[in-house]
């Protein structure tokens, strides 16, 4: 009778000592975009677009591609709304600039067109910190290169190397 009780006590003692270490090892410190960061991204993108007289829509997402902030400049195309959000979502979820997929579709890889939710148009850029995607910016309404320029300027204004 004493041995099972001793084993139970030893097991409980071992778990009480090691469990906190195991639990903390399972948690990660993750950077996220704050509300202030989202506002800064949108403001910087808006300033770049207005300076160049580009009528665009701007979307900012979290790492999962969910919308955190959005701005449609006056007189921007209605169609640019969904496209900007799709570009940001694609860049966040796949962790690459959307130009990568646009280029691959243009050259030979049409299979990307069958990936649900992937927008293969230049203008979406992931936001990375320490090698981890924490969000993305998608822009639509100007040329594809101009859209990407707006997104890149916004990210550079907020995320310092």
Image: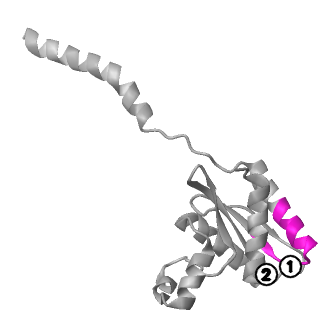
Q: Is residue 151 left or right of residue 9?
A: right
Label 1: how many Cα within 10 Å (few below 14, some 14–19, many 20+): many
Residue 105, numbered circle? none
Magenta segment includes 53: yes
Of the 4 image quadrants, the one containing the N terminus is top left
Q: Residue furthest front?
A: 161
Residue 102 rendering spot, x and y as whole percentages:
60, 83
Residue at 55% across, 76% down? 117
Residue 146 figure quarter: bottom right
Q: Which residues are magenta?
A: 43-58
In the picture shown, does residue 154 fall above or below 114?
above
Mark 2 vs mark 1, CA separation in Å: 6 Å
Q: Earlier in the sequence, mark 2 or mark 1?
A: 1
**Horizontal and vertical percent for residue 22?**
37, 31
Residue 118 belongs to the span the image colors magenta = no
Residue that mark 1 sits on: 55
Going by the image, does 155 lie left or right of 62? right
Q: Residue at x 53, y 90 (%)?
A: 107
Q: Is residue 91 visible?
A: yes
Residue 59 pos. (x, y %): 73, 67
| Vertical side of 16 occupied by 58: above or below | below
Q: Residue at x 71, y 48 (%)?
A: 34
Q: Is residue 41 above or below residue 106?
A: above
Q: Position of residue 90 (x, y in %)?
A: 58, 71
Circle 2 sits in a helix, a strand or a loop, which is it? Answer: loop
To which residue does mark 2 refer?
141
Give 37 or 147, whichever is nearer the viewer. Answer: 147
């Amino acid at each position: 009778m004493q041995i099972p009780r001793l084993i139970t006590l030893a097991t409980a003692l071992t778990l009480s000592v090691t469990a906190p270490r195991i639990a903390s090892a399972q948690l990660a410190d993750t950077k996220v975009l704050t509300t202030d960061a989202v506002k800064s991204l949108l403001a910087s993108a808006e300033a770049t677009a207005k300076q160049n007289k580009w009528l665009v829509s701007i979307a900012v997402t979290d790492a999962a591609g969910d919308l955190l902030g959005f701005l449609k400049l006056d007189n921007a195309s209605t169609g640019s709304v969904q496209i900007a959000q799709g570009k940001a979502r694609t860049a966040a979820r796949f962790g690459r600039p959307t130009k990568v997929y646009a280029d691959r579709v243009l050259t030979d890889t049409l299979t990307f067109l069958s990936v649900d939710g992937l927008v293969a148009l230049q203008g979406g850029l992931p936001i990375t910190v320490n090698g981890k995607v924490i969000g993305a910016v998608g822009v639509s309404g100007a040329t594809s290169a101009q859209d990407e320029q707006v997104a890149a300027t916004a990210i550079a204004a907020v995320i310092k190397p």
